[in-house]
Image (cartoon, grey):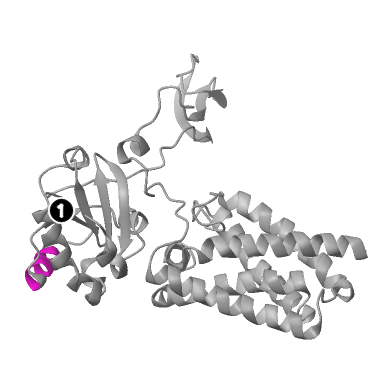
Amino acid sequence: MKYIVQISRIFTGILFIISGFIKLNDPLGFSYKLEEYFGADVLNIDFFIPYALGISVIVVVFEVVLGVFLLIGYKPKFTVWSLLLMIVFFTFLTFYSAYFDKVKDCGCFGDALKLTPWESFTKDIVLLGLILILFFGIRHIKPIFTKLATTIIALLSFILSLWFGYHVLSHLPAIDFRAYKIGANFQEGMTTPENAPKAISEYTWTFNVNGEPQEFVTNGSYPKVDGDYVGVETKLIDEGYIPPIQDFSIESDDENLTDYFLEKDNLVMITMYNVTKGEPEGVAKLKAFTDEAIKKGYTVIGLTSSGSEDKAQLKANYNLNFDFYLCDEKVVKTIVRANPGVIILKNGTVVNKAHWNDIEDINL
């Protein structure tokens, strides 16, 4: 039992640290996932949505710290009880979203590793088993350093986690796992290669044959059956290749301008998923930066999901010399984790991106 507990301790601690750090690298992204869970279509607890970012930071810092506590043996009872309560909650959450098909990506490992809800539920069941081993074998969890050293490491892990969370919120994620990272090309990200795996679906056809309903399964072709057609059900077996960039577009009220702008030699995109929720200090910096970019020959546009009136009001309030175009809100949130954010493209390839806090550091 002693050795089993130590193996469970190491595996669980490392997994919690990795999972927590990936989300701590992008707490804003995790808050968007929490908003999805809190929404009317999933848990229907909308009143938590305004606090999603704060909850996000607390959860991911706690996740990292618990992993460290477990590895160094700091306060075993508190650590194991906390791990147990946390994994029970997340196991329920992933089962609920998987069973009722509510959330397609659990967000357990941010954008670094996509897991389906059922995959995430399976992972949580394994973790629950490991934590139960720790729970019943808690007497075998001993500190690996002296009491003072263990306390100092525990405190440092908490302070460093809080600092790192604050740092990436004030700038951008230290590691960018998204399809819009520096060096990525938009056109390539939206394209499906010719030899890419195709989606595979299974079709179950129902026919009335001699007064009896009978089912016939095909890969899509209409079956040759001597009977009356009743209905068909489709089941997706394999999604096939899915381009990393989906739903991205640059649209005016009249036309789709995506290809037109992505072919520009030097393009600055100001991203604001909602112009009414933009940080006032950040929006105030846009005038000087975009005027300089235009002066140096850049094409400057804005991307937002906001309506025409809100866009016109923002442009007038800050005397901006560029136009905002329509883009899906979720996509705009993904491109740059800031409101406003800046992304610079050359013929569709990302050459720079920045949080509004760092707008003065961009070299045009």
The answer to which quarter of the image holds residue 28 is bottom left
The answer to which quarter of the image holds residue 229 is top left
Residue 58 visible to the viewer = no
Placement of 114 over or under 1, stated as above or below: above
Placement of 213 over or under 264, stated as above or below: above
Residue at horizontal 38 percent and vertical 76 percent from the top: 50
Q: Which residue is mark 1?
A: 300
Q: Which residues are magenta?
A: 309-317
Placement of 316 over or under 47, stated as above or below: above
Split into 4 quadrants, where in the image is the C terminus? bottom left
Placement of 316 over or under 213, stated as above or below: below
Q: Tell me residue 286's x, y (percent).
A: 18, 66
Residue 315 included in the magenta stretch of the image: yes
Split into 4 quadrants, where in the image is the N terminus? bottom right
* Residue toward you, 280 or 291: 291
Please identify the dominant SS of the magenta region.
Answer: helix
Q: Secondary structure under badge 1?
A: strand
